Image (spheres, coloured by chain):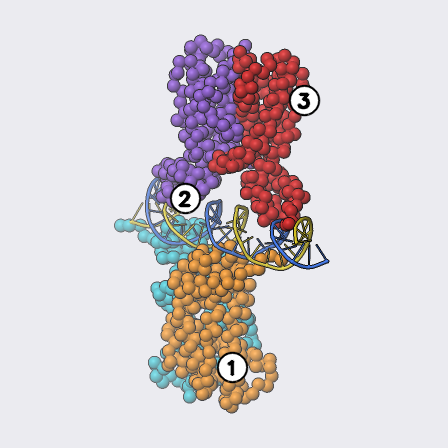
Chain colours: A purple, B red, C cyan, D orange, E blue, F yellow
Amino acid sequence: MARPRSTQADQAILDATRAVLVESGWSRLTMAAVAARAGVAKTTLYRRWPGKSELVVDAVAVLFDELELPDRGSLAADIEGVVLSFAHLLGHPETKTSLMAVVAESTTDAALRGRIKAAVVDRQKRLVVEGRVRAQARGELPPDADPVRTARSVDLIFDVIAGAVVHRSLVSAESVDAAWARRFTALLLGGLAALEA
Amino acid sequence: MARPRSTQADQAILDATRAVLVESGWSRLTMAAVAARAGVAKTTLYRRWPGKSELVVDAVAVLFDELELPDRGSLAADIEGVVLSFAHLLGHPETKTSLMAVVAESTTDAALRGRIKAAVVDRQKRLVVEGRVRAQARGELPPDADPVRTARSVDLIFDVIAGAVVHRSLVSAESVDAAWARRFTALLLGGLAALEA
Amino acid sequence: MARPRSTQADQAILDATRAVLVESGWSRLTMAAVAARAGVAKTTLYRRWPGKSELVVDAVAVLFDELELPDRGSLAADIEGVVLSFAHLLGHPETKTSLMAVVAESTTDAALRGRIKAAVVDRQKRLVVEGRVRAQARGELPPDADPVRTARSVDLIFDVIAGAVVHRSLVSAESVDAAWARRFTALLLGGLAALEA
Amino acid sequence: MARPRSTQADQAILDATRAVLVESGWSRLTMAAVAARAGVAKTTLYRRWPGKSELVVDAVAVLFDELELPDRGSLAADIEGVVLSFAHLLGHPETKTSLMAVVAESTTDAALRGRIKAAVVDRQKRLVVEGRVRAQARGELPPDADPVRTARSVDLIFDVIAGAVVHRSLVSAESVDAAWARRFTALLLGGLAALEA
DNA sequence: GAATAACCGAGACGGTACGTCCTGTCTTTCT
DNA sequence: AGAAAGACAGGACGTACCGTCTCGGTTATTC
């Protein structure tokens, strides 16, 4: 019966959030600035998102969708490729700062934790699944046996890849270059073989 | 000639920082609260640390020193042990919140990045080195050949272990239990074997 | 052709306005609250009144109609009576708050000023006129000579009575009791005598 | 032991308040605007005054100090003079709007009521006292007998004068000119005579 | 054993962002 | 066409911290 929420506004806000993020970074990103940029009142922001963190999660989540897994001919090449893509994505200030900031906030906010899991983690596991299927088609990995076991593997591999890349580039503060990607891939492939045995 | 800074104050401040962290978490930790708790003026804090992040890095760094690597008889057992110890440490709210918060800050602050590397990362690599030495003594791993190669391995392994644990518990928001530790260790051991080959 | 405006709604809105005024006072009275209380949309309010002040003037004006001037036997008793009645009316929070609030608004809004004059001031001058006629009948005051002179007197007396009561109770913040009413009446009667001379 | 509050800031704030009041009027006066104008942080305002109303009372109170009672030779002339001076003061938008606005607020705020009484009402009663003393010196009024009686008279006369002027100019919305002042004075003088009898 | 400088506690200061609230307009749907 | 519902732009509110500063008072060195 009442006026429905403007979907235009939703999009404008998310776009504005990313724009402000690039220009000012997480810490200088203000709800007021986002609102102004989107040509929207602050009220409208708060009607849709509880706060800065939730807004940024949703705004940033789509950036991870640009990650793709083109067929590079072998599982090793595919892994190296995704590692470098991910590292490149984490090189952008708005991505790395936002990601870490919201993860930090999520340590004291279960709802935010859930939102991150849904918008980022679960969505990007597709990459692991895709690589796995392709490797099975090539015969590099045995076909799935137990679906539970498979899900566990996917989770484990996802955490190992994403965790190692994030940790090296953001915590250890070292660059993720081709050489590191090769060594990491060697380790992971060895591990996968052991896991399947 | 002049009066030296009180070392008592330093300790009181670090203790107060940890206390406030436990009670209020990172986001509700204020310099004023730390000062009040320590019975110290805000000026005194700022005379010693540039800001909240640096103070917290120093206050939290020592918590990681409680991580130890008792000899559990095999490399596999040692890895599982340290994974679970680390996960347990990350279970404490003040540890996980502070760690992620300072890492988040460090993405836009090189000095802070260096401080984290020195106070946390480099200090805890001792665990990897120790485990490696012990495994070599047991004959589970070949002795060091090239020191450069060894350093690279230590870094890689450290990032893989720490990264996977942090990612699973804080980003993926899943518990790091004995079963996961076992699967992860299997993967890592397989990888190590491949790496040495 | 078109649907006529509901007169029921008008009454419900004015009633709701008074109810909210009593409960919340002028400053916490919101158009939304009045609308909700009246079971009416905000649009409907704005279709009938330009804003909060005008609505409140209309809602409150009728309260002053309860002032009456029963014949107490002498001019002095009549004046004391109306002073105390008026003071009693100003004792109600919704009356005093609303009256002063709309007067305050009217200092920067000529239309509102006119509305107050019409709805409250001119309407209540009847009390002065009535008391005057009665006193003339009793022989306490000489009959009207010049109608212009009479009108001026009525205006003057109205401002003196209303002004003194409002000022004492709302600005000086002292109670208007029987003793004060007696002293004020003595002063006014003396003044009236001088005026007629 | 700590840094004392800046008296410069106090003065700058009160000056800024009056300036903003003249330019924008009560309703468009914001704390932020006052702060900016005074070159002061909003915090500093709130450290000294609980809110807009209290600040404005203090800022406006001094304006009433410009009212004076030069000896015009007779009690009648003195009263006419002060009536016209007061009316002139109430002609300034910032004075009338502010006065009425804070009085309106004070109807639901006892602390504010007290502040107005102290800063405006009690301070300006000096005018009545002064006029009375002078009239007694001239022999127009009998000397004080009972101090309680005198205080009551002063209060009553103050409310009658101030009330009538305020009511005529702000509620009845008619101009207070020389002719009205003359008629009002005649009434008041007659009343005073009756009061003393 | 004074002199003297840097220390200390307290807390006021200029700023900035927050999230809430209310206003008056507008859109949508129902009657 | 009028009304209920409520989303919208705009803008002020009062609060909370930040990091700097100004105080008066207190040590330890140095002369």
Answer left or right for A5 relative to C21.
Answer: left
Label 3 marks a residue whose chain is B
Mark 2 secondary-structure assignment: helix
Q: What crowding class fits label 3: few (fewer than 14 Cα within 10 Å), some (14-19), or many (20 or more)? A: few
Q: CA distance from mark 1 to mark 2?
A: 59 Å
Observer-nearest residue: D114 or B119?
B119
Amino acid at pointer 3:
Pro
Q: CA distance from mark 2 to mark 3?
A: 53 Å
Q: Quadrant of the N terminus of chain A?
A: top left
Label 1 marks a residue whose chain is D
- Residue at 50% from the left image edge and 75% from the top image edge: D124
Q: Nearer the viewer, mark 1 or mark 2?
A: 2
Q: Quadrant of the C terminus of chain A?
A: top right
- In the rendered image, residues at marks 2 and 3 fall on the same chain: no
Quickly name the residue at label 3: B70
Amino acid at pointer 2:
Ala
Quickly name the residue at label 2: A33
- On the image, the x and y values in percent for residue A53 come to 48, 37
Answer left or right for A6 relative to C17.
Answer: left
Observer-nearest residue: A40 or A26?
A26
| Residue reaching furthest to the bottom | D139
Q: Are marks 3 and 1 in contact (CB under 8 Å)?
A: no
- On the image, the x and y values in percent for residue D43 come to 51, 54
Residue B116 seen in the current view: yes
Which quadrant of the figure has residue A12?
top left
Q: CA distance from mark 3 to mark 1?
A: 94 Å
Quickly name the residue at label 1: D130
- Residue at 45% from the left image edge and 42% from the top image edge: A28
- Residue at 44% from the left image edge and 65% from the top image edge: D18
